[in-house]
Amino acid sequence: MRIGEGTASTGTFNTIPWDSAAKYLKLSQDITNGATFVTVGQPTQLVSVPYALYAKNALHVPANSIETVKTVYEDLRLYTDVAPNKVLYVKGYYKEADGGGGFFMYKENEDMPDNGGIYIQPNNANAHQGGDATLKGRWVRQYDGYINAMYFGIMKYPDVYTAPYNTISNSSRIQTAINYIADSHNPNSGSNPDPAPPHYSQQRGALALYFPAGHYYIDQPIILKSEVHLIGEQGTLFEVAYGKDYPFMFEIPAGPVTRLCVENLQIDLGGERKDNPTTAGGFHFGARFEGDDTRFGGGIWGCSFKNIRITSANGHGIWLEGGEHSPGNNPGALDNQYLLFERVWIIRTSANANCLKITGAINTTTFLQCNFEIPYVYNTDTIVTPVELGTNILITAVGDYPPVNGAVVSFINCATGGHVLCGFKIVNAENVTIDNCWIEDTEIAIDIQNSEGINILNSRFVNAAGIGSLLGAALPQGQGKCISVLDSHVSIERNFVQITDPDNVKLTEGELFIMGIGNKNVINSRNNCFHDIRQSETFGITEYEEIKNIWAWNYLGTANEWKSGLELSAKKVVLVNKGTDKPIDRINSTINSGETIFIRAEESDIIFNAWNPVNELTGRNIYLGGPASVTLQQGHAAMFMKLDGVNNKERCVYQLVSIY
């Protein structure tokens, strides 16, 4: 049934005053379609009315009930006709409809500092700054959701270079917005920490600074702080301002920075400009104490960075600088830790910079679906293009003490390469995992030195040793390798290796899958797959050891503390030189029960002495299956399996499995 669309017999339907008095509906009908109507039921009160007709009167606002001013920048502070809870509508920040306007309410007891965005203090003498800060009374911006960067007068191109706005620092206004969000009364700093920072009160909106799509020129470094969330759109671009240069676009203050989040930004560092290219880097997270206060440490903790693309970097794209291990210094207090970098893409333009640089202490950090490269080089299979002599990813510690760098750092589904000397360089590091990554067009894909717990798994190497079948190699023929290992412990499993032109003669000239340098490596490699059999060649996995006096630690302080034997770490394939003219009584190895060791007598015969299988008291731990000793002739080999179990002071045994 539609009411109001028929022919009125009396009165005018459109003039019914719906908002005054009760209204009733009486229904009559004539089933013969004649003129005799019979009332149906009782008259019924209308308890809801047509919305549009009601709204015409019920939502009517008297004209000029909310006053308007043109801009925040030129007009709002000069407006002094104030009253408690009075509301003004401001049409824009610098000009109408520029995104920085909105509703402001006057709060007579508010005393927050005038920050040019959320709090504006009336001042009839100066449109561009607040009045006496000791006086109360502020215009308070009314907003919901994210804090729009436009609220603080942050400008996009071309306004940022348009008079009179070209004298205003974009970076300083961004910093003001960040400081507002982070709050100066952080509970972790200051002599009188505020347990309830004012920015967490009910009158605040979301603590995220939103940059709409546009081009923002950055004239000086921006200091990121705790609890800040910077979010852009796919079309949000930050660029180093013309005529400006600085070490990094983003840095952090001293002390810990927690729960920082940056996402959806494009960053152009200006390194490829024809005129006056910059030397700027992207992010520098330098961990340091706040003055002499070492209670809270420093660095970024529990932070995330997503959907960020950094280009034209003549400085480091990202530098995670943790504390270094030195006498009297605890590097763990200056960790960058518990971090997530997701879909971060960095393109560097200088051989002296890294896409990613990690130095000092770092802990529990993941790089997921990230890309680290130089500008793409085309047609390197047909055009000689010299390799760029830089490193995309550098992980190192430079302290004098043992490594403190790289505790559980993972690269998952990442990519690196781009016709460069080195993809990864890992020095003095621990616990670094490269899993399901793509490494392409490198002289040395991964260079590992003096490091432990390095895992290279499930990854793909394409033209990754001596740039494969491509042209322009910098290293002499035969010095390229997918993985180079010096004095390190590395696991290499389930990787795939290929080149784009398997018929290239370069394959026969010594490029290696793995190159072990020196005699202090532990390289466990298995289940890898190769496009061509010649790509599977390795050197240095098999290592030489000598018979020498080794420690039987369960006999400390006794005559049995030292025994002649083999100190193998986790090596599994060893060639034994004579060393001391003694038999082998003991093997020290960090392999686990069930794992095996292959031993070949290299220079001469060697003798193994058995332990007492019932009650070992002399520090021996070799079980020969009956004989008191076994002689392994020169050139022959033996296989031992490590088994656990207690025999007096011994906790494991090396069981002779076979002799070849």
Image: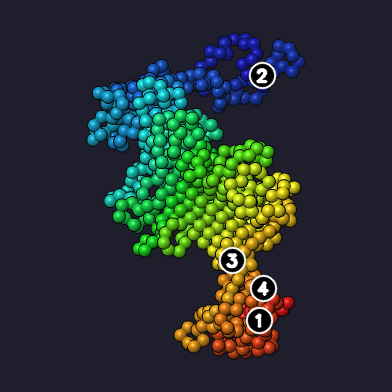
Q: Residues within 10 Å of mark 3 (few under 14, many from 20)?
A: many
Mark 2: which secondary structure? Answer: strand
Residue 605: which disc?
1
Mark 2 near mark 1, Cβ–Cβ under 8 Å?
no
Residue 522: which disc?
3
Name the one closer to the observer, 236 or 486.
Answer: 486
**Residue drawn at x 36%, y 21% as measured from the top left:** 164
Quadrant in the picture for residue 324: bottom left
Q: Residues within 10 Å of mark 1 (few under 14, many from 20)?
A: some
Residue 587 placement (x, y as % from top left): 59, 78
**Residue drawn at x 49%, y 30% as measured from the top left:** 274
Mark 3 near mark 4, Cβ–Cβ under 8 Å?
no
Q: Residues within 10 Å of mark 2 (few under 14, many from 20)?
A: few
Mark 3: which secondary structure? Answer: strand
Residue 598: which disc?
4
**Amino acid type of the residue tagged 1 in the rendering:** Asp
Name the one closer to the observer, 657 or 609.
Answer: 609
From mark 4 to mark 1, how far is it between C-alphas?
16 Å
First reached walking from the N terminus: tag 2 or tag 1: 2
**Apparent side of residue 368 relative to residue 91 in the rendered image (left or right):** right
Residue 268 placement (x, y as % from top left): 49, 35
From mark 2 to mark 3, how far is it between C-alphas?
98 Å
**Amino acid type of the residue tagged 2 in the rendering:** Ser
Q: Quadrant for the N terminus, please.
A: top right
The mark lying in front, picked from 3 and 1, is: 1
From mark 3 to mark 4, how far is it between C-alphas?
14 Å
**Amino acid type of the residue tagged 4 in the rendering:** Phe
**Residue drawn at x 42%, y 33% as measured from the top left:** 218
The residue beneath circle 2 is 28
Residue 544 placement (x, y as % from top left): 60, 71
